[in-house]
Image (cartoon, grey):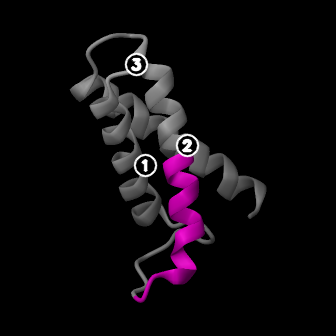
């Protein structure tokens, strides 16, 4: 993955974590956990793309839809664990 794609992926995952915390967060100490979960979920989504049977739109090498879905799922898991 190129440096611009990596930087844009980091930016998208961070924005998702911030928005998720803004809408569903209960305390400020959850924000770092949401951020870590979002980064890991977004990265997992990028790695999962070759195994998917459908091809969704991409931005160069970055697949924001797949990454975003897994980032949201990871943050939901963190929220349900109540860290």
Residue occupying image coordinates x 49% and y 72%: 58
Segment colored magenta = 40-53
Q: Position of residue 12 (x, y in %)?
A: 49, 45
Task: Identify which residue is drawn at 56% across, 81% down.
Answer: 50
Mark 1 to mark 2: distance in Å? Answer: 7 Å
Taking 61 as reference, is 54 above or below it?
Answer: below
What residue sits right under mark 1 in the picture? Answer: 71
User: Is residue 41 depicted above or below 21 in this figure?
Assistant: below
* Secondary structure, magenta segment, majority class: helix
Q: Are circles 1 and 2 on residues that touch, CB within 8 Å? A: yes
> First in sequence: mark 3 or mark 2?
3
Q: Which mark is residue 39?
A: 2
Q: Is residue 17 left or right of residue 36?
A: left
Q: Residues within 10 Å of mark 1 (few under 14, many from 20)?
A: many
Q: Residue at x 43, y 84 (%)?
A: 55
SS of the residue at dot 1? Answer: helix
């Amino acid at each position: 993955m190129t440096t611009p794609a990596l930087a844009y992926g980091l930016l998208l995952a961070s924005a998702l974590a911030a928005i998720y915390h803004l809408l569903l967060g209960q305390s400020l100490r959850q924000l770092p956990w949401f951020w870590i979960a979002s980064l890991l979920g977004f990265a997992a989504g990028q790695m999962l793309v070759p195994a998917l049977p459908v091809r969704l739109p991409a931005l160069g090498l970055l697949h924001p839809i797949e990454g975003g879905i897994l980032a949201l799922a990871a943050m939901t898991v963190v929220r349900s664990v109540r860290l």
